[in-house]
Amino acid sequence: MEVLDFSELTREPRDRDRLLNDLKGVEERLMRLCDGLAVDREADPEPNGLAIARAHLELGFLELFRAVLKPETHRGYWVLERADTDPDAPLYYAPAGGEGGTQWTGYRPRALHLSGKDDAGCLASALGIQCRVVNYVE
């Protein structure tokens, strides 16, 4: 198994481009490690747990890059609200975290967050239920 050395990330000072390149290198090494674990018969990791861990690592690095880059764009997201619910107390589409065995929740953080209005609109059409496509900026 590869031993990862992160000591180079603690040296100061560094320009932003070099920092981003170093972080990208660490991300790539971690993703290769996950790929190696997936086929390691001796380690025999549970596939769903490994997939979840990899997804969280990818999301973590995405947020880390955003923190370093400090994009000027807003950090908004799009959600689907059931059109037959009150706009002041909507139900949000949450395929993985709905309430009572449904795919809908009144708790927006559990809702599926989409990055684009077009994606949200396509999903709303595919669901076959009247939805409001709503943008939230936090």
Image (spheres, grey):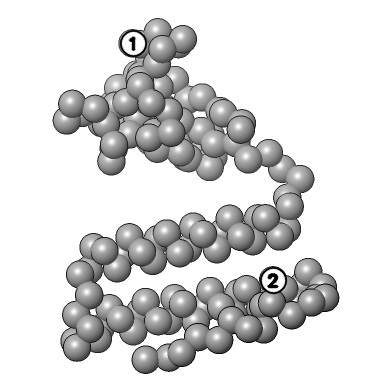
**Mark 1: which secondary structure?**
loop
Residue 91 lies, in percent from the top left, at 35, 20
Which of 103 and 116 lies nearest the eye of the viewer?
103
Number of other residues with Cα within 10 Å of mark 1, as a class: few under 14, some 14 to 19, many 20 or more:
few
Decide: marks 2, 1 in contact (CB < 8 A)? Answer: no
Position of 48 with respect to 79 (left or right) is left
Q: Name the residue located 38 percent from the left edge and 66 percent from the top edge.
A: 54
Give the spatial CA distance, label 2 vs label 1.
Answer: 46 Å
- Name the residue that disc number 2 marks: 20
Residue 27, above or below 113? below
Which of 57 and 125 lies nearest the eye of the viewer?
57
Position of 83 with respect to 117 (left or right) is left
Residue 103 lies, in percent from the top left, at 25, 31
Residue 68 lies, in percent from the top left, at 71, 60
Residue 62 lies, in percent from the top left, at 56, 59
- Name the residue that disc number 1 marks: 84
Residue 130, above or below 88? below
Residue 124, above or below 71? above
Number of other residues with Cα within 10 Å of mark 2, as a class: few under 14, some 14 to 19, many 20 or more:
some
The amino acid beneath tag 1 is Asp
The amino acid beneath tag 2 is Leu
Q: Name the residue located 65 percent from the left edge and 55 percent from the top edge.
A: 66
